[in-house]
């Protein structure tokens, strides 16, 4: 049975109503692939019981360029009896193309494989997937057109994620699921994973956002141990758009760097904000990737904008070991009035095996409008607890200069080949001691230009949290008491704030709990 489109046309409509539905045939309402692909049609199948094992397809016309979107399949009893349990998920394989709205928000526990060139999009419902495999040149999407409507996914969890060959996975944009905890992550060469749209409404105080100027947030992907990214993991264009963002402009937009039109924003050492964009085009999104074991990155990790005047977004990597020769980018958009670079942070115990490119490129527009490069933060830790305040003592930092502009790069000129400026503020921090039990901490800190390694005169404002409350701490800069103070006092919440000027040399900062000098009494 067919209602296929013709000559760039969309697929038509097929509506079947039956008490018993059986057979092995095909139901097809695909769009035509000629020229600009037509969209898929609509199929509705209503029945009391079914043993049908044939194929249903409402695939959009596949042109390799302007593909039509999948049509809809309304089959309210399609997955009845296939909900599974956490202990016994149902093995599901999809080899058809359709857009499906679950009739309710029942949780389905599946092991899901999408293959055979299928293009599938899910809406509504709640999926808990143990093993998710997308391969065979297939595409799996969730809530492509995010609207916040009841049709959007109620929830999605995945344990083992494998995207193979030229498979494509587009994660949902529903703000109730901004993070994923994975046992394994494997994105093969040629495979692609895209994050959903960022959450524009999130204040993100950690980034410096306020209710008046929200910084938004993207996706967090945390793995139990190791991860392999040989393909693409992207938040391209998933940042602010549609007249949103703290520095929205119809001209060049800012984030880690500024432009001649707008100022930058965000946190240099903990980048999690969305990049600014304009109109219906997006700035770069935000990805935080946590891999306590080894992250092998031979592919691409990017949060570039789709908007030619949009800013790059955020990439924040925390990994035990980082290896590979891939690329990590949060570049600004290229236009006559270009967008600025974003922010990248890479925190590892060992990154000596990584030889890839890290770039937050600024641009020089054809109208001589400058957009400045973003920022890069490298941290080397001796144990993973130094990553965050959650596991004990933590540290957050703001800098007097944490947005690239003309005061930092006065020599900024166009590259005559491609108008890119591969530069950045680079802050490097190496933790040499992180003893939360004994409350002793020591690290090396420097602030330089990526292009030349020349020092940037800066000031670091540190706030340490999770310390003993109302307690004296000794703070030293390069072995000398900071500001000649014998000690500094933490507040009632266990927070300790202090400021260190960063000059031309590498600074060694030491913080330790103060103990009184011992005395010896001699009795005669």
Image (cartoon, rainbow, N blue to C red):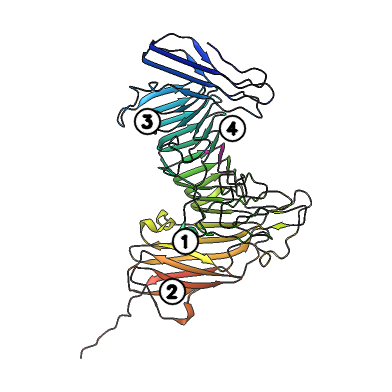
User: Relative to 255, is 218 on the left or the right?
Assistant: left
Residue 397: x and y in percent read: 49, 64
Q: SS for tag 1?
A: strand
Q: Does residue 502 appear in the picture of this structure?
A: yes
In the rendered structure, which disc, 2 or 3, sits on the residue that comes first in sequence? 3
Range of residues picked out in magenta = 229-236
Whether the magenta-drawn stretch holds residue 230 is answered as yes
Pointer 1 local density, CA inside 10 Å: few below 14, some 14–19, many at least 20: some
Q: Which residue is mark 3?
A: 104
Q: SS for tag 2?
A: strand
Alpha-carbon distance for marks 2 and 1?
15 Å
Residue 157: x and y in percent read: 40, 37
Whether the magenta-drawn stretch holds residue 447 is answered as no
Q: SS for tag 3?
A: loop
User: Relative to 282, is 106 on the left or the right?
Assistant: left
- Report the mark closest to the observer, 4 or 1: 4
In the rendered structure, which disc, 2 or 1, sits on the residue that comes first in sequence? 1
Residue 437: x and y in percent read: 33, 63
Pointer 2 local density, CA inside 10 Å: few below 14, some 14–19, many at least 20: many
User: Relative to 453, is 472 on the left or the right?
Assistant: left
- Report the mark closest to the observer, 2 or 1: 2
Q: Which residue is mark 2?
A: 475
Q: SS for tag 4?
A: loop
Residue 148: x and y in percent read: 47, 41
């Amino acid at each position: 049975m067919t209602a296929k489109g013709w000559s760039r046309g969309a697929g038509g409509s097929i509506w079947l109503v039956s008490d018993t539905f059986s057979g092995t045939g095909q139901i097809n309402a695909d769009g035509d692939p000629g020229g600009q692909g037509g969209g898929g049609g609509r199929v509705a199948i209503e029945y009391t019981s079914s043993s049908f094992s044939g194929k249903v397809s409402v695939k959009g016309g596949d042109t390799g360029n302007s593909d039509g979107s999948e049509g809809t399949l309304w089959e309210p009893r399609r997955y009845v009896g296939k909900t599974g349990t956490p202990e016994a998920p149902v093995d599901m394989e999809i080899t058809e193309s359709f857009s499906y709205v679950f009739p309710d928000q029942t949780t389905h526990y599946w092991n899901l494989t999408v293959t055979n060139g299928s293009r599938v999009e899910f809406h509504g419902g709640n999926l808990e997937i143990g093993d998710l495999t997308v391969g065979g040149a297939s595409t799996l999407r969730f809530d492509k057109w995010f609207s916040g409507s009841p049709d959007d996914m109620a929830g999605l969890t995945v344990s083992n994620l494998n995207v193979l060959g030229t498979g494509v996975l587009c994660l949902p944009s529903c703000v109730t699921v901004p993070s994923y905890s994975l046992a394994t992550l494997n994105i093969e060469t040629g495979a692609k994973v895209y994050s959903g749209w960022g959450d524009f409404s999130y204040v993100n105080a950690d980034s410096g956002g306020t209710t008046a100027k929200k910084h938004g947030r993207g996706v967090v992907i945390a793995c139990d141990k190791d991860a392999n990214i040989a393909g693409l993991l992207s938040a391209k264009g998933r940042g602010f758009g549609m007249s949103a963002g703290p520095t929205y402009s119809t001209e060049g937009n800012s984030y880690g760097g500024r432009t001649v039109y707008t100022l930058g924003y965000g946190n240099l050492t903990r980048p999690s904000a969305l990049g600014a964009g304009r109109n219906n085009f997006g700035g770069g999104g935000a990805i935080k990737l946590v891999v306590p074991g080894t992250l092998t990155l031979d592919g691409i990790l990017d949060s570039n904008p789709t908007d030619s005047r949009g800013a790059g977004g955020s990439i924040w990597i925390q990994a035990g070991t980082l290896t590979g020769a891939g690329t990590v980018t949060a570049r600004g958009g290229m236009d006559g009035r270009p967008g600025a670079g974003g922010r990248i942070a890479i925190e590892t115990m060992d990154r000596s095996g990584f030889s890839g490119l890290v770039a937050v490129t600024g641009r020089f527009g054809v109208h001589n409008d400058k957009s400045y490069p973003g920022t890069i933060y490298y941290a080397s830790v001796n144990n993973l607890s130094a990553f965050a305040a959650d596991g004990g003592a933590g540290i957050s930092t703001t800098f007097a200069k944490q947005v690239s502009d003309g005061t930092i790069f006065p020599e900024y000129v166009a590259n005559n080949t491609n108008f890119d400026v591969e530069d950045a503020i680079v802050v490097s921090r190496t933790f040499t001691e992180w003893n939360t039990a004994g409350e002793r901490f020591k690290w090396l800190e420097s602030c330089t230009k990526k292009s030349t390694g020349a020092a940037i005169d800066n000031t670091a404002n540190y706030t340490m949290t999770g310390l003993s409350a109302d307690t004296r701490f000794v703070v030293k800069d390069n072995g000398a008491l900071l500001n000649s103070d014998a000690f500094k006092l933490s507040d009632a919440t266990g927070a300790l704030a202090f400021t260190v000027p960063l000059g031309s040399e590498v600074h060694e900062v030491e913080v330790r709990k103060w103990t009184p000098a011992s005395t010896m009494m001699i009795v005669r």
